[in-house]
Image (tube, rainbow, N blue to C red):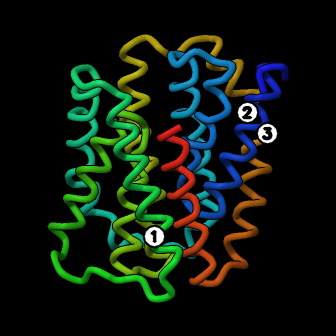
Amino acid sequence: MTELSPELIVVLGAFLAAFVAGSSGFGDALVSAAFWLHVLPPVEAAPLIILTGITLHVFLLIRLRSRLDFSRLLPFLSLGVIGVPIGTWLLQHLPAEPFKVAVGALLLLYGGGLLIFANPPTITRGGRGMDAAAGGIGGVLGGMAGLSGIVPAVWSGLRGWPRDQARGVTQPFILIMHSLSLAAMAYAGLITPQLAHNYLWALPAMAVGGLVGIGCYTRLNEERFRCIVLAILAGAGVTLIV
């Protein structure tokens, strides 16, 4: 992969990340990181992942706003915004590698395991308090590793919510957590001219990939959407472990 030019890697990663997010509502950060960290140092890759993620999710939310159900979102945000600075603090005090392996193993077991079941179990108890707790954990993971969308996606699946309702949680949640992270990066001086250069290369590919992904999403039924989300979660687990 590193034999290709950095700009081409940025374009390819942007297209595939946008396609994954367009078809499922999350997963773009993991896909883009898998490509961009090969050619960009972390201090350049992380702001690019966040900035492109914000742009992508704004675009996707505008395109799908009439379909999505945002009624379950507020409890997730209530603790998610608190979790981001906690995750940032933990990032500075805990080793990152064991954390990534542990999260990856859980995602692999969850995604891979539920793909086997035709009728996966659902959780109906706990109400908004448990939803808020899931949002808080998502915020912590977002502050630590940019993985804010994983826990809301898992929890929405365990709740058995329809895809438009699940996506109405994960996608705006990621957008808001990314915005908080970008503000922290700007405060740390990580917004540079090189970021603007890479962002402009990624922008057209994101638009095309997002549109293709939305086209797939609108043609999916509930069962196929569930399988795609579980496959992405399991793949994300493998990525984190490797």
Q: Which residue is mark 3?
A: 204
Q: Which residue is mark 2?
A: 202
Residue 6: horizontal and vertical position, in percent?
77, 20
Residue positioned 55% across, 60% down in the render: 25
Q: Find out whether the residues at labels 2 and 3 contact each other: C-beta distance under 8 Å.
A: yes
**Left or right of 112 on screen, residue 214:** right
Instruction: State the residue in front, 57 or 149.
Output: 149
Q: Find out whether the residues at labels 3 and 1 contact each other: C-beta distance under 8 Å.
A: no
Residue type pointed to by label 1: Gly
Q: Residues within 10 Å of mark 3 (few under 14, many from 20)?
A: some
Q: Find out whether the residues at labels 2 and 1 contact each other: C-beta distance under 8 Å.
A: no
* Residue 120 vertical placement versus 167 (above, below): below
Q: Which of the marked residues, 3 or 1, is nearer the chain's N terminus?
A: 1
Badge number at residue 57: none
Element type at mark 1 = helix
Closer to viewer: mark 2 or mark 1: 1
* Residue 74 vertical placement versus 197 (above, below): below
Residue type pointed to by label 2: Ala
Badge number at residue 113: 1
